[in-house]
Image (cartoon, helix red, strand yellow):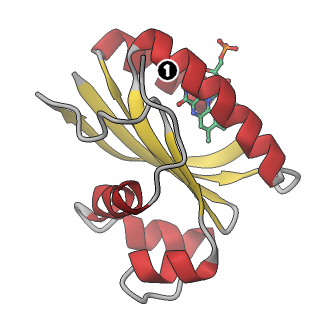
Amino acid sequence: MYQIVYMSTAQISMKTPDVLEILEKAQDANGEHKITGFLLYYDGCFLQVIEGQEDAISSLWENIQNDERHFDIHLIAKNKIEEREFPDWSMGFIDANAAQASEHLGGVQITGPDDFLRYVKTPGMALKILQGFARSYTFDDQPN
Ligand SMILES: Cc1cc2nc3c(=O)[nH]c(=O)nc-3n(C[C@H](O)[C@H](O)[C@H](O)COP(=O)(O)O)c2cc1C
């Protein structure tokens, strides 16, 4: 199995309902393709982990890179894994506010995508942040 972690910037026109629409479709499709993961939306940025079988992850990663709803897509990690780290979510999600972000970013103030990217690029940091959110918030359905 493979796990991909990336960060991207949402198109300026994206509103929370647009993100929820992506999420709803993603949860259905991921359930079907046995993909699990977690999506953080904060300050106009996405930080997402997807995990599953190699072919399913490759094709989803291709789709995500071609999706015009976001840009400046940075691959942070591609890991070969034996076990899922986010087994409980077909795609967990948090639309984080400043207080939640500050709590999970160890009090670090993030201002904008460049700053966020610099922070999550610290080795191991992106997954640690996503795991922290995944443990605290469970808005989401179980994989089938
Ligand atoms: C930030 C972001 C995260 C996404 N996450 C997923 C996901 O986890 N699963 C999924 O199937 N699609 C996800 N998508 C949507 C895909 O980019 C793409 O629209 C989807 O795979 C459907 O592609 P298709 O219509 O070509 O089948 C995401 C899109 C964005 C912008």
Query: Which x, y percent locates residue 107?
Result: 42, 89
Q: Quadrant of the C terminus?
A: top left
**Of all residues shown, which one is farthest toward the left?**
82
Decide if residue 69 is on the left or right side of residue 104. right
Ligand 1 lies in quarter: top right
Q: Which quarter of the rendering shows the N terminus?
A: top left
Circle 1 Cα neighbour tier, 10 Å, few/some/many (<14 / 14–19 / ≥20): many
The residue sitting at 67% across, 69% down in the picture is 43
The picture places residue 78, in percent across and down from the top left corner, at 28, 37
The residue singled out by tag 1 in the image is 30
Taking the image as shown, residue 99 lies to the left or right of residue 22, namely left
Judging depth in this view, the residue of 38 and 66 nearest the camera is: 38
Residue at the right extreme, as displayed: 13
Q: Image height check: is 54 above or below 137?
A: above
Residue for point 43% across, 71% down: 118
Question: Height in image: 119 above or below 92?
Answer: below
Which residue is pictured at 31% across the width and 22% down the height? 52
Count numbered badges in the picture: 1
Horizontal arrangement in the rendering, residue 114 relative to residue 104 (left or right): right
Q: Give how far across and how far down residue 57 sits, in percent.
A: 39, 21
Question: What's under tag 1, amino acid-wise?
Answer: Asn
Secondary structure, mark 1, is helix
Where does the image place residue 23, in percent across and percent down from the top left?
Answer: 64, 35
Res 143 visible: yes
Residue drawn at x 52%, y 40% is 140
Q: Is mark 1 within 8 Å of ligand 1?
A: yes
Is residue 69 visible in the rendered image? The answer is no
